[in-house]
Amino acid sequence: MPSPPHLNDEQRLAAREKAAEARRIRSEIKQRLKIGSMTMAELLEEADTVPTVARMKVLAAVESLPGVGKVTARRTMERIGIAESRRLSGLGSQQRTALLEAF
């Protein structure tokens, strides 16, 4: 396993801030999904244009939908053929369509 890159303090701080911003954005999206102010279709559209959203895991997004728990999310994704580790950017067109039909 390769060692992590050697960063100076300034680079390390910038990387930390970038990571915190990405976590904040993903958290906001999950909250919007949870309260129903964002649909799965809107999320997939946003994933096409925002790289931070595109790197979000599909499982995390589906579990954030109202009325969908961990078991339902995993079973539905398994039925559709989406791996638990798949990210929004990695979904194919048929998987997107099946996901939208399911939720």
Image (tube, rainbow, N blue to C red):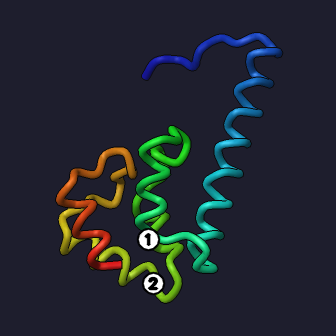
- Give the labeled residue for mark 2: 68
Residue at position x 45%, y 84% in the image: 68
Specify the farthest residue to the bottom.
Answer: 67
Question: Which secondary structure, mark 2?
Answer: loop
Q: Is 12 located above or below residue 103 in the figure?
A: above
Q: Which of 62 and 13 is in front in this view?
A: 62
Q: Is 27 located above or below residue 51 in the figure?
A: below
Residue at position x 49%, y 89% in the image: 67
Q: Is 64 located above or below residue 5 in the figure?
A: below
Indicate the quadrant containing the C terminus: top left, top right, bottom left or bottom right: bottom left
Q: Residues within 10 Å of mark 2 (few under 14, many from 20)?
A: some
Question: Which secondary structure, mark 1?
Answer: helix
- Residue 65: horizontal and vertical position, in percent? 50, 77
Residue at position x 29%, y 69% in the image: 99
71 with respect to 69 (left or right): left
42 with respect to 21 (left or right): left
Q: Nearer the viewer, residue 44 or 62?
A: 44
Q: Are marks 1 and 2 in contact (CB under 8 Å)?
A: yes
Instruction: Name the quadrant containing residue 102.
Output: bottom left
Residue at position x 77%, y 33% in the image: 17
- Give the labeled residue for mark 1: 62
Indicate the quadrant containing the N terminus: top left, top right, bottom left or bottom right: top left
- The amino acid type, in three-letter code, at marker 2 is Val
- The amino acid type, in three-letter code, at marker 1 is Val
Q: What is the CA distance from the residue labelled 1 to the residue labelled 2?
A: 7 Å
Q: Nearer the viewer, residue 27 or 15?
A: 27
Q: How crowded is mark 1: few (under 14 residues within 10 Å), some or many (20 or more)?
A: many
57 with respect to 97 (left or right): right
Of callouts 1 and 2, which one flags the residue occurring earlier in the amino acid sequence? 1
